[in-house]
Image (cartoon, rainbow, N blue to C red):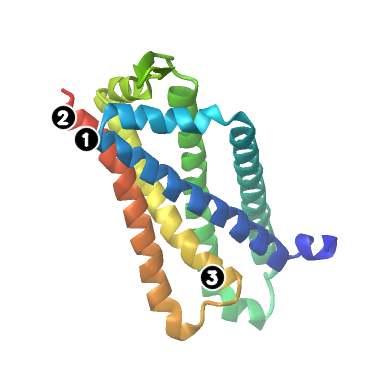
């Protein structure tokens, strides 16, 4: 098992599995965010329900953090491995034949690394702003809870933050579309005849997630001026 995890295939499997965990999480998180379009009380009640179950919350956060760490670690290891492999194939006809593929792979890896780094910075800032941001309180149906709606409205009235949010979601959309289709390839189920449909499915998922997330800041920025 240890040898498998140290292999290229094993690392790709780990990267794909941990990526899928976050694929599911961002979809669920996006759907929860849409409640802001319904009512402030429902949005705050949703947030309160999540933080009320401490055991489940800590377990979920620990799992997501572990998955993120493994995903980033595997990405770094695979990128380094690809670069070393490309550098080692300096002589021989094999290198001449594979040069274009290696070059394309290197460009894709560098671009994904930039996206991943930007998204990681976005996640950290997002947590600082909302999870650990100003704690307002409100009462819904006799229950005192955090007024997350007020904080969201306050933050998304800042044009600079909204612009940053839009740019990061654009990167997330591209990262998800490429990542979801790559998972099928890593698991060896991306047959040639299904490639176009799977890539379309990946893009559809990425557009839905990014569009859903964008609805929150745009709604607040436009209707709460």
Q: Nearer the viewer, residue 164 or 20?
A: 20
Res. 203 image quadrant = bottom left
Query: Which residue is the site of mark 1?
Result: 219
Question: Residue 154 versus residue 15: which sits nearer the camera?
Answer: 154
Viewer-nearest residue: 127 or 135: 135
User: What residue appears at the point 24 percent right and 23 percent down from the top-left corner?
Assistant: 157
Find numbered disc 3 in the image and state the secondary structure of the residue it sits on: helix
Sequence-wise, the earlier of marks 1 and 3 is 3
Query: Which residue, as the protein is rendered here, is positioned at the far bottom?
Result: 193
Mark 3 — residue? 184
SS state under label 2: helix
Residue at (39, 29) in percent of width and height: 45
Q: Nearer the viewer, residue 96 or 38?
A: 38
Circles 1 and 2, Cβ within 8 Å, touching? The answer is yes
Q: Residue at x 51, y 46 (%)?
A: 116
Of labels 2 and 3, earlier in sequence is 3
Query: Measured along the vertical axis of the image, is residue 191 above or below residue 88?
Result: below
Residue 5: % across, % down? 77, 61
Q: Is residue 166 visible?
A: no
Horizontal side, residue 116 vs residue 197: left or right: right
For the C terminus, the quadrant is top left
In the rendered structure, find residue 223 and report the number of the disc placed on it: 2
């Amino acid at each position: 098992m240890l040898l498998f995890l140290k292999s290229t295939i094993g690392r790709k499997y780990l990267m794909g599995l941990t990526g899928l965990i976050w694929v599911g999480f961002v979809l669920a998180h996006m759907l929860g965010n849409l409640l802001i379009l319904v009512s402030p009380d429902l949005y705050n009640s949703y947030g309160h329900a999540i933080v009320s179950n401490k055991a489940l919350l800590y377990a979920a956060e620990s799992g997501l953090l572990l998955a993120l760490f493994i995903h980033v670690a595997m990405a770094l290891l695979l990128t380094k491995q690809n670069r070393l492999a490309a550098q080692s194939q300096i002589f021989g006809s094999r290198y001449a034949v594979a040069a274009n593929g290696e070059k394309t792979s290197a460009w894709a890896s560098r671009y994904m690394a930039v996206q991943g780094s930007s998204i990681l910075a976005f996640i950290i800032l997002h947590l600082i702003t909302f999870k650990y941001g100003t704690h307002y309180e409100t009462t819904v149906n006799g229950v005192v809870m955090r007024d997350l709606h007020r904080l969201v409205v306050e933050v998304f009235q800042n044009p600079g933050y909204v612009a940053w949010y839009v740019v990061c979601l654009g990167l997330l959309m591209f990262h998800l579309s490429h990542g979801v289709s790559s998972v099928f390839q890593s698991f060896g189920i991306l047959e040639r005849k299904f490639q176009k449909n799977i890539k379309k499915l990946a893009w559809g998922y990425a557009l839905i997630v990014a569009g859903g997330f964008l609805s929150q800041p745009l709604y607040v920025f436009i209707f709460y001026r």
